[in-house]
Amino acid sequence: DSGVTQTPKHLITATGQRVTLRCSPRSGDLSVYWYQQSLDQGLQFLIQYYNGEERAKGNILERFSAQQFPDLHSELNLSSLELGDSALYFCASSVGQRGYNEQFFGPGTRLTVL
Amino acid sequence: AQKVTQAQTEISVVEKEDVTLDCVYETRDTTYYLFWYKQPPSGELVFLIRRNSFDEQNEISGRYSWNFQKSTSSFNFTITASQVVDSAVYFCALSETLTQGGSEKLVFGKGTKLTVNP
């Protein structure tokens, strides 16, 4: 158990809908990262927050947004969902702000868009 | 752009065999970090090792060992005396500098699925 929690574990929704994925980092970690894992794209970095501020941005679509709250938990919002958004979404956390720190991954949220 | 290639898509071995997972990377950064992560069937990614580009010493941790060769841009992972519990997808990753002054992201390879048969 990495200490990173993600909810929900599974999510099934329809095209055009909006969903929110939630992540709680390990105790003491200030950075939260979001990743998308799909069969065709592999594991892709989406975005990083450090202590409430956006720190680094990857291949995140404009339809997607994230934030990190004062208690350090983070939410990833996915809107206008398309079939291609079906994937496993991981959250990871680390102590420091540098992207090369050891990252601890949560169990993931499997999103299915029908 | 940075790139990580794991040419072996799937490997199947019999228990107690040694197995090496290959990782080749491309980077323009002079300082970078390399990683290996394990994704067992349960799905969670588990950190195995991080290596700084200035440290080319090989590392051994129990049955696991890593061979970093800057000259060939490779960071290979060997499991000695494999066990059924080693069955997983293994990812190699490379840090990529995003902006001047320090933000980075991890670039992952496509992964190698290792099956260890009893």
Image (cartoon, rainbow, N blue to C red):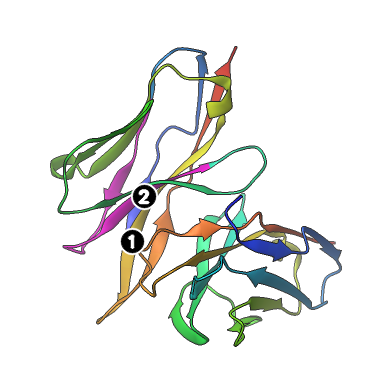
Residue in the picture at 43% in, 32% down: B8
Q: Check the image and report above or below for A60 versus B32.
A: below
Name the residue that disc number 1 marks.
B95
**Disc 2: host chain:** B
Left or right side of A57 for A25: right
x, y percentage for residue A80? 76, 79
| Figure check: B79 above or below A74 | above
Q: Could you tell me the amino acid type at mark 2? A: Phe
Q: Farthest residue toward the front?
A: A27
| Residue A55 picture location, percent across and down | 43, 81
What stretch of residues is rendered in magenta? B20-38
For the residues labelled 2 and 1, say whether their Cβ atoms are less than 8 Å apart. Answer: yes
In magenta stretch: residue B34: yes
Badges 2 and 1, same chain: yes
Nearer-the-camera pick, B81 or B28:
B81
Q: Which mark is residue B35?
A: 2
Quadrant placement of the C terminus of chain A: bottom right
Q: Position of residue B89 (x, y in %)?
A: 54, 37
Does the stretch in magenta take in A97? no
